[in-house]
Amino acid sequence: MSRVYNFSAGPAALPLEVLQQIQDDIPDWQGTGMSVMECSHRGKEFVAVAARAESNLRELLAVPDDYSVLFPQGGATMQMAMAPLNLAEPGDKADYVVTGSWGKKAAGEAAKFCHANIAADAADRNFTYIPEESTWNRSENAAYLHYTPNETISGVEFHFVPGGDVPLVADMSSTILSRPVDIGRFGVIYASAQKNIGPAGITLVIVRKDLLGRARQGNPHLMTWKSYADSNSMTNTPPTFAWYVADLVFQWLQEKGGVEAIADINERKARKLYAAIDNSDFYSNSVAKDCRSWMNVPFVLADNALDATFLAESHAAGLTNLKGHRSVGGMRASIYNAVSEEAVDALIAFMIEFEKTHG
């Protein structure tokens, strides 16, 4: 069976070169006579993988020495709880900027552990814009400010980093490694793996070391960042296969020229796709142009009665996972790092032909 063009929002496409390396490694990884999934996480072979993955990640994102790089389990959703548990005491205020479903979920999770102040909320325009930073209702003495740089569902993305004196916490699940990031402007960055890192099951956390001592007393061991920092993320048995794949993805990115090179490709992919939508009377995108996502491009057809036909015909053409999230409908093309420019060109060509036939 030939490979399809996979526009899934997550679990998302992986680089073909990485998949081929995995295929080669599965029966006998590094001469061990077993797969990486069967090796001890404390054996010298896997410890070397973990160390290399951290080193390569630090190089790719220019992570300063005063930051810890952690690889826990639980996905971004667990980090939504870990942020208040590690940065705020009960009753403390934490500010949340809500520009989509994931920001809303993060604020709801934090409200279980501290006072989650909604500093800004874009729900009044159905999460299609980012409120001006000058209008945000920020708390005095907030423990931190949390935001979601890219909302996977609605396709809204920050093209700026919020200011302020409190630690900035960012859920970068769908933007990490897609372009350079000034790590030093953040207190904590967290990201689930299944967009630009690897398979689901492992999470990336980058946390400034001076924040590791702020966890509240009585935290469960696995809900405390310092426990991962102290154990090189070997607090318990880690998801070794996902970590190994992440290591391969980091190497692939380096071979592609790093995040600077992949950013040029990502910007070009997004620009092409938005141009195809904007230049058509048949397709539309409702997100304000100054905050459109590079990674997740939602769009609707002029006649939603054609949605099922579009999905069936695109799938037959080898363009998969284009159905929009159930909460917004329409279509969504997620064009993460591993989605090639060729794939985006094929989607655009299909969209043009579909419009000619059905428009």
Image (spheres, grey):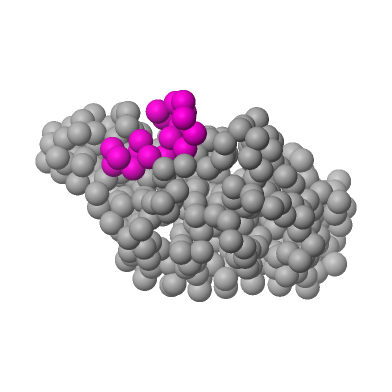
Left or right: where 227 falls relative to 306:
left
Say above or below: 187 vs 159.
above
Quadrant containing the N terminus in the rendered view? top left
- Say which residue appears at 21% left-offset and 30% top-offset: 40
209 is within the stretch colored magenta: no
Quarter of the figure with residue 277: bottom right
Whether residue 93 appears in this view of the structure is yes
Q: Position of residue 102 (x, y in %)?
A: 66, 44
Quadrant containing the C terminus in the rendered view? bottom right
- Say which residue appears at 73% left-offset and 70% top-offset: 290
Left or right: where 175 falls relative to 150:
left
* Camera-side residue of 169 and 250: 169
- Say which residue appears at 54% left-offset and 67% top-offset: 266
- Say which residue appears at 74% left-offset and 39% top-offset: 326
* Camera-side residue of 225 and 6: 225
Q: Position of residue 181 (x, y in %)?
A: 48, 65
* Camera-side residue of 199 and 351: 199
Say above or below: 49 vs 355.
above
Whether residue 100 appears in this view of the structure is no
Q: Position of residue 70 (x, y in %)?
A: 37, 45
Q: Position of residue 278 (x, y in %)?
A: 77, 70
* Camera-side residue of 59 and 189: 189
The extreme front residue here reads 141
Q: Give the magenta range.
A: 215-232
